[in-house]
Image: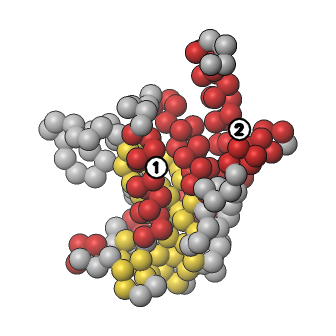
Amino acid sequence: MSGLNRNTVNRYLKAIRVRLAEYCEEQSPFGGTVEVEESYFGPRRVRGKRGRGAGSKTIVFGIFKRNGSVYTEIVPDCAKSTLQKVIRGRVEPNSVIHSDGWRGYDGLVDVGYEKHFRVHHGANEFAAGDRHINGIESFWSFAKKRLARFNGIRKEDFYLHLKETEFRFNHRRQGIYKTILKILLD
C-alpha cells in the first residue's frame, strides 16, 4: 500500500514509538487520587515455574490517576524498595494512594504518603465505596488485549510497545492521529 519496504516501515514505526515513549516519560508527577498495581506480561505458563512472575514474565508497575492517565514502568521485581522508589519519583506526597494488599506497598505512610488505602483481594474485597483499583486494572486489561494482537513481542521491543499502549490509553478520547503529529513535530 505505501510502496515502502517492510523493514523501512518498521524503522519508521520504531522511531515513532521512541518519540511516544519519551513523551510518556515527561508526563509526571501524578497528584490527587491515584491507584498503583503491578502486572505480569509474558507467556501464559512456563512448565515447572510457580509463583509471582514465574519464568520469563516481565513485571510492569503502573500508576493510574483517577479520571486521568496512566504511567507504566518495567521493574526488576516487586520488592517494597523497588515499588516505593517508583512511587516516590512519580507521585506527589499529598496524594491519596489506593493499592491492593501486596506487601510491597507496606510502609507508604512511613515515607510520607499519609493517605494510603488498600483493597484486599484475598478476602474477596474488590471495591468498598471509593476504595478500589478498578482504573489500573482496566488499563491492564486494555494493554494485554492490545499487545496480544502481536502474537509475541521481542523483549527488547516490549518497552516501546508498552509505552505506545500507555499513550493510546491516555489519549483514547482524543484524535490520536493529530496528537501524534503534534508530538512528532515538536
**Looking at the image, which residue is at 59% across and 50% down?**
168
* Picture layout, residue 154 above or below residue 164: above
* Picture layout, residue 1 above or below residue 123: above
Q: What kind of element bears circle 2?
A: helix
The image shows residue 30 at horizontal and vertical percentages of: 64, 67
Name the residue furthest front: 1
Q: Nearer the viewer, residue 155 or 86?
A: 155
**Looking at the image, which residue is at 44% across and 41% down?**
147
Name the residue furthest right: 186
* Picture layout, residue 10 above or below residue 141: above
Quarter holding the C terminus is top right
Name the residue furthest left: 48
Look at the image and name its color scheme: secondary structure
Marks 1 and 2 in Cβ contact (< 8 Å): no
Label 1 or label 2, whichever lies nearer to me, is 1
**Looking at the image, which residue is at 60% across and 56% down?**
172
Q: Earlier in the sequence, mark 1 or mark 2?
A: 2
Q: Horizontal placement of 67 versus 27: left or right? A: left
Q: Nearer the viewer, residue 5 or 102?
A: 5
Query: Which label sits on residue 19?
Result: 2
Quarter holding the N terminus is top right
**Looking at the image, which residue is at 68% across and 34% down?**
16
User: Where does label 1 land, which residue?
Assistant: 143
Dot 2 amino acid type: Arg
Name the residue furthest bottom: 129
The image shows residue 13 at horizontal and vertical percentages of: 63, 29
The image shows residue 56 at horizontal and vertical percentages of: 32, 37
